[in-house]
């Protein structure tokens, strides 16, 4: 995995991309320090980004703290109205945000990047409609007890490089709707589109409600250990999640951790090969496999294993992988060089252990970019790194099984537990097996489908808490019981 604590050296011949700046307390912040952002399509820096230091992190937390009381006191309908205006403003600038997103993340501008920004806008609108409920827990002769929810305070949001805009929106919209104020730190691999999004949002929010700081992982550490931060919402790798938990312990920070996944999909003998292969393909390789809940291990019954593997390999071989600004590209490069090296190492190791690539398997050095073709590998088993580890890239290992219960056992024999799925024409049997999967989300004849009204979160080492819907909103709120005299 990339070293998240480092940023690339600033490139002397590059300017800051105007007008992308950090926003702290409603002001655009100019820093003397910058770091370079690399274009995954060329492997070369294409822009400098403002680099926050400890001072800016302190300022951002102070600004969020100062804005908290006023924001929390606003009726939720008014907070929601601000968020509706944020959605409208993002809609008006969606091509600008998508352009930067594609350039720094690698995904095709016209499809995936625009789709991500569109998804973020829809998510903003849907989330802004949520309203916390007052629950009456008891109302009898002994009294009435209500369960209410209040904002927590200052929320720090720390995001990864695979879906920088969508994941930031998943964090900040429920936090802000719930009456909290936010300091957002994007990944140093993909900071620019997030900074632009925060600038746009700030045109429709009171000063200090949403602040941004850009830089390496140590800024995230500083936020995790900061006494002025009440909650961390983090999406990223499991080791970083553990580190955040450690630093957050000092003031018992509330935590939502959305961490890694190594999702298994199990295809039973009676599945329709053609229909299943097409859908599994989409759910494995979207965003070039850099999806937390992508299918990362495919268990297929012996009787249809070869047909499934061949069809998936055909689909993978036909896919067009290229630069994000080429309208022909269906998939982009992986986001960074360390991730490319990690994938290359996994593929080489799999081949050395007897794995057979039916599609892809070797990096492609097109123009210095971080290209790895969509790859399908068979003759691999549990116990090999290509199966046991989260690849987080466009390689799908296919594992043959004879007994469905044994496949479920293998799916569960992994420390991660984000998602899992069963594919079959017998929905009853698939449902029975899906319920046995040790993961936060299970699907039948589908995988990784999410929506703003359905909670999503990890089991085991894939995370803590959940996002989306009322369950997700409540993660940004403190429960308070209110006891009233009988008849009140
Ligand atoms: P990462 O953990 O390396 O970095 C994520 C963010 O944390 C970045 O902003 C980084 O600067 C920051 N960070 C790094 N070290 C830190 C520290 N010690 N304290 C605080 N912050 C720190 O993850 P990544 O490589 O950017 O993302 C890939 C990982 O994210 C994969 O494992 C993937 O499965 C996971 N992910 C999970 C979900 C989910 O919803 N479960 C979604 C997307 C990605």
Image: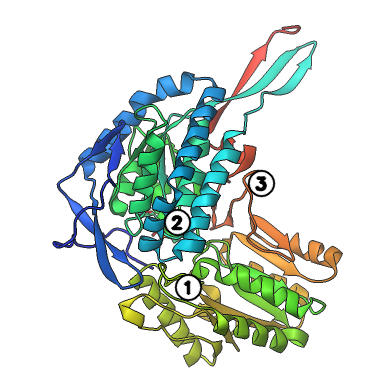
* Cα–Cα span, label 3 and label 1: 32 Å
Q: Can residue 185 be seen in this view?
A: no
For mark 1, give the secondary structure.
loop
Q: Can residue 339 be seen in this view?
A: yes
Mark seen at residue 236: 2
For mark 3, give the secondary structure.
loop
Q: Earlier in the sequence, mark 2 or mark 3?
A: 2
Mark 2 and ligand 1: say if the CB distance to the nearest ligand atom is below 8 Å.
yes
From the viewer's perspective, tell me whether residue 382 is left or right of residue 332: right
Instruction: Choose between 95 and 275: the one closer to the eye.
Output: 95
Question: Badge 1 local density, few (<14 within 10 Å), some, or many (20+)?
Answer: some
Q: Are marks 3 and 1 in contact (CB under 8 Å)?
A: no
Task: Say which of marks 2 and 3 sits in front.
Answer: 3
Task: Say which of marks 3 and 1 sits in front.
Answer: 1
The residue pinned by badge 3 equals: 454
The residue positioned 54% from the left and 31% from the top of the image is: 477
Mark seen at residue 329: 1
The residue positioned 47% from the left and 70% from the top of the image is: 327
* Cα–Cα span, label 2 and label 3: 21 Å
From the viewer's perspective, tell me whether residue 32 is left or right of residue 438: left
């Amino acid at each position: 995995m990339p070293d998240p604590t480092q940023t690339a050296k600033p490139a002397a011949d590059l300017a800051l991309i105007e007008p992308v700046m950090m926003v702290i307390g409603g002001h655009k912040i100019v820093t003397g320090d910058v770091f370079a952002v690399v274009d995954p399509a060329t492997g070369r820096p294409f822009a400098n980004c403002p680099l926050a230091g400890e001072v800016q992190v302190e300022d951002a937390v102070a600004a969020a703290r100062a804005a908290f009381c006023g924001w929390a006191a606003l009726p939720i309908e008014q907070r929601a109205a601000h968020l509706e205006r944020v959605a409208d403003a993002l809609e008006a600038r969606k091509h600008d945000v998508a352009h930067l997103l594609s350039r720094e993340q690698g995904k095709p501008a016209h499809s995936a990047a625009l789709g991500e920004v569109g998804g973020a806008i829809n998510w903003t609108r849907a989330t802004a409609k949520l309203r916390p409920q007052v629950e009456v827990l008891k109302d009898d002769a002994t009294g009435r007890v209500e369960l209410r929810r209040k904002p927590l305070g200052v929320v720090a949001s720390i995001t990864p490089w695979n879906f920088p805009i969508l994941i930031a929106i998943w964090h900040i919209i429920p936090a802000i709707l719930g009456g909290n104020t936010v300091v957002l730190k994007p990944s140093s691999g993909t900071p620019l589109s997030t900074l632009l999004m925060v600038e746009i949002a700030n045109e429709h929010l009171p000063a200090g409600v949403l602040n941004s700081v850009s830089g390496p992982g140590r800024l995230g550490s500083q936020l995790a250990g900061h006494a002025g931060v009440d909650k961390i919402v983090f999406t990223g790798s499991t080791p970083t999640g553990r580190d955040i938990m450690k630093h957050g312990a000092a003031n018992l920070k509330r935590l939502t951790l959305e961490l890694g996944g190594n999702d298994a999909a199990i295809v039973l003998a009676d599945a329709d090969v053609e229909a299943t292969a097409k859908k599994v393909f989409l759910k494995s390789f979207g965003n070039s496999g850099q999806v937390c809940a992508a299918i990362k291990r495919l268990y297929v019954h012996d009787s249809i294993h070869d047909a499934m593997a061949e069809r998936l390999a055909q689909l993978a071989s036909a896919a067009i992988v290229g630069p994000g600004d080429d309208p022909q590209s269906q998939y982009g490069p992986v986001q960074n060089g360390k991730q490319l090296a990690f994938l290359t190492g996994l593929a080489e190791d799999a081949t050395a252990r007897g794995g057979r690539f039916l599609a892809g398997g070797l990096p492609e050095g097109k123009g210095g970019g971080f290209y790895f073709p969509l790859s399908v590998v068979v003759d691999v088993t549990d116990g090999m790194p290509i199966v046991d580890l989260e690849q987080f890239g466009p390689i799908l290992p296919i594992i043959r099984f004879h007994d469905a219960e044994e496949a479920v056992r293998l799916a569960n024999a992994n420390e991660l537990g984000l998602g899992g799925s069963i594919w079959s024409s017998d929905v009853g049997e698939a449902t029975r097996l899906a319920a046995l999967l040790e993961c936060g989300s299970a699907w039948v004849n589908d995988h990784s489908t999410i929506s703003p009204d359905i909670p999503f979160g990890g089991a085991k080492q894939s995370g803590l808490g959940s996002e989306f819907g009322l369950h997700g909103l409540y993660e940004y709120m403190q429960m308070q019981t209110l006891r009233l005299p009988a008849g009140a």
